[in-house]
Image (tube, rainbow, N blue to C red):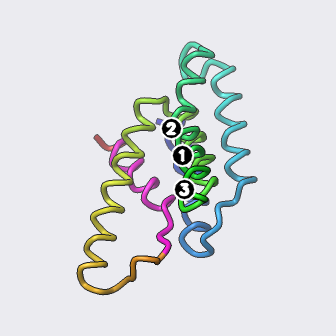
Amino acid sequence: MWIELILFLFLAVCAVFDGIWKKIPLAVVWLGILTAILLRLEGAMGEPSWLAAGLSLTPGILFWLLSFISGEKVGYGDGWVLMMIGLFSGAGRCFLILLTGLAVESFLVLALLAFGKVHRDKEVPFVPFLLLGMGVVVCL
């Protein structure tokens, strides 16, 4: 549980920055990635496995590719954050967090579009929804 708390703190800082300034503090994300790597090497997350660590980077790498293909409609910072989440929680839980965050964000944006509160070209920060997705996944 304490590992989820560490991830929650790193993710909360990133969510505040993304929500307010629409920028992700990469220094915080890289510190989180380094922390996750050190915890994995120490064995705090079970037996250290390079294959499991590599697979846990998959959601972040896929988001990097999406950023490249879309011309940064999805930011590279979101990929970094997903890599951090993956290293802390593993590939399976990272995908669950990602899908939960995407579902909640999609529902909210569709509702805001339907009521005319936002326009189609409005940028919506994603990391706060990842934080919410993490909360849902950890509680379930």
State whether residue 125 is above or below residue 134: below
- Tell me if label 2 and label 1 are in contact, CB under 8 Å: yes
Q: Position of residue 1 (x, y in %)?
A: 46, 36
Q: Say which amino acid is labelled 2.
A: Pro
Reading the image, the residue beneath label 3 is: 70
Please tell me whether mark 1 or mark 3 is closer to you in this view. Answer: 3
- Tell me if label 2 and label 3 are in contact, CB under 8 Å: no
Residue furthest to the right in view is 27
- Disc 3 packing (10 Å; few <14; some 14–19; many ≥20): few
Residue 2: image tag: none
- Name the residue at 53% across, 29% down: 56
Q: Is 47 displayed left or right of 135 in the figure?
A: right
- Disc 1 packing (10 Å; few <14; some 14–19; many ≥20): many
Real-space CA distance between mark 2 and mark 1, rounded to the nearest whole angstrom: 6 Å
Name the secondary structure under disc 2: helix
Real-space CA distance between mark 2 and mark 3, rounded to the nearest whole angstrom: 16 Å
Query: Which region shows up in magenta?
Result: 123-137
Real-space CA distance between mark 1 and mark 3, rounded to the nearest whole angstrom: 10 Å
In front of the other: 36 or 91: 91
Residue 120 figure quarter: bottom left
In front of the other: 67 or 126: 67
Residue 59: image tag: 2
In front of the other: 138 or 125: 125
Q: Position of residue 26 (x, y in %)?
A: 71, 54
Q: Say which amino acid is labelled 3.
A: Ser
Instruction: Work out whether mark 2 precedes mark 3 in sequence or the reverse, and give the earlier one.
Output: 2
Q: Position of residue 117 (x, y in %)?
A: 33, 86
Q: Say which amino acid is labelled 1.
A: Phe
Please tell me whether mark 2 or mark 3 is closer to you in this view. Answer: 3
Q: Is 85 displayed left or right of 23 in the figure?
A: left
Reading the image, the residue beneath label 1 is: 63
Name the secondary structure under disc 3: loop
